[in-house]
């Protein structure tokens, strides 16, 4: 690991985030209407055009796009994401309240999906082409094919019919208030999110496990008469670990921004729901702030995975020097 490599990756990360900020800013302004028309709705037509223009001037929406962007970017660099144009609340405060919900939901989903996916992948690879392999792969395909909003809707419908459970945005229980109450609210959405994650991890584990199981040192271990369990967990799985770690890291980064629909259906006040409401209200400050934060999390997680990849596998460093 060299300082040059780290510097290059950090520079690439900053360029990527700057590109995300520019694209989001431009796309939002290209949409028809703005925060004022979204907030006023049909009332905008009854207002005097001068009043609407005054509101746009008050929020700085009549300034040149470059001036708006530089003003917003300068604030972000100092930790100021601006004010919600809909409620006037600082966006940093809204993110601070919503982020723990999304992070906890993502961590819980990964804690469920990772062991299930790894064990299922190992189970399928134990008899490649056999009945259990085909069954596990078939279940994985179903898990990947089912959209999260379908699974979440089915889950809520079943919970409502059997347990009279109805998600209510006003009844969220923070982890600091009650661990059991909080987990009872996050368990079902975490299970929904973990289905697709486990399927992806299973497929990666199966491929990596089969590749590692066919190497010479594993055949040597079998020739020495080592127990099958010892060979699987001490020799095969560690050597198949790098693709699995990479997949888990990428999935976690994706998950931080992929909880929008699930949070909305289960009425969880997380980052995804905040982003969705910001889009519906065309609240530029919220959409820009949450999108940049999600992109940052995704890029940073991938950077950590890449660095861990090079530390774990010396061959990647040798390949880079060649």
Image: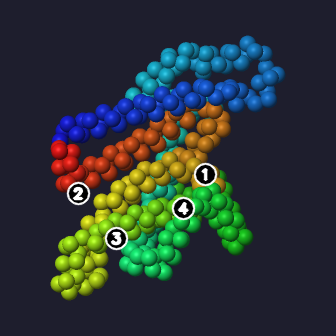
Q: Which image quadrant is residue 83 in?
A: top right
**In 3D space, how far apart are the residues under numbered discs 3 and 4 (Cα atoms)?**
21 Å
Q: On the image, numbered disc 1 is attached to which residue? A: 261
Outermost residue, right direction? 46
Q: On the image, numbered disc 2 is attached to which residue? A: 312
**Is 1 in front, or is 217?**
217
The label nearer to you, 2 versus 4, is 4
Q: Residue at x 66, y 35 (%)?
A: 281
Q: Is residue 306 above or below residue 17?
A: below
Q: Position of residue 216 (x, y in %)?
A: 21, 72
Q: Position of residue 75 (x, y in %)?
A: 44, 26
Q: Residue at x 39, y 69 (%)?
A: 206
Q: Position of residue 317 (x, y in %)?
A: 19, 49
Q: Callout 3: few (<14), some (14-19), or many (20+) C-alpha neighbours within 10 Å?
A: many
Q: On the image, numbered disc 3 is attached to which residue? A: 210
Q: On the image, numbered disc 4 is attached to which residue? A: 144
Q: Residue at x 53, y 46 (%)?
A: 271
Mark closest to the chain's N terminus, 1 or 2:
1
């Amino acid at each position: 690991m060299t300082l040059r490599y780290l510097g290059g990756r950090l520079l690439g990360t900053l360029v990527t985030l700057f590109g995300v900020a520019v694209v989001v800013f431009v796309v939002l302004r290209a949409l028809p209407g703005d925060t004022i028309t979204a907030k006023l709705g049909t009332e905008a037509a009854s207002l005097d055009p001068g009043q609407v223009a005054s509101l746009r001037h008050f929020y700085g929406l009549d300034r040149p796009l470059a001036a708006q962007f530089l003003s917003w970017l300068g604030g972000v660099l100092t930790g100021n994401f601006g004010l919600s144009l809909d409620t006037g609340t600082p966006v940093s405060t809204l993110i601070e309240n919503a982020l723990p919900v999304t992070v906890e939901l993502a961590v819980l989903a990964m804690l469920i999906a990772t062991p299930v996916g790894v064990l299922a992948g190992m189970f399928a690879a134990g008899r490649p082409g056999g009945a259990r392999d085909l069954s596990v792969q078939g279940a994985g395909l179903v898990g990947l094919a089912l959209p999260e909003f379908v699974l979440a809707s089915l889950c809520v419908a079943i919970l409502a019919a059997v347990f009279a459970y109805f998600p209510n945005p006003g009844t969220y229980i923070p982890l600091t208030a009650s661990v059991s109450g909080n987990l009872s609210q996050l368990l079902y959405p975490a299970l929904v999110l973990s289905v697709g994650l486990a399927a992806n991890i299973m497929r990666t584990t199966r491929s990596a496990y089969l590749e590692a199981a066919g190497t010479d040192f594993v055949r040597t271990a079998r020739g020495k008469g080592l127990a099958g369990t010892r060979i699987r967990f001490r020799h095969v799985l560690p050597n198949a670990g790098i693709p699995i770690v990479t997949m888990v890291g990428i999935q976690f980064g994706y998950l931080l921004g992929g909880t929008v629909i699930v949070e909305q259906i289960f009425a969880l006040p997380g980052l995804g729901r905040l982003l969705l409401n910001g889009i519906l209200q065309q609240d530029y400050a919220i959409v820009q702030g949450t999108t940049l934060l999600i992109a940052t999390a995704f890029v940073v997680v991938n950077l950590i995975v890449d660095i861990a990849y090079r530390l774990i596998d010396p061959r990647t460093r040798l390949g880079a020097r060649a």
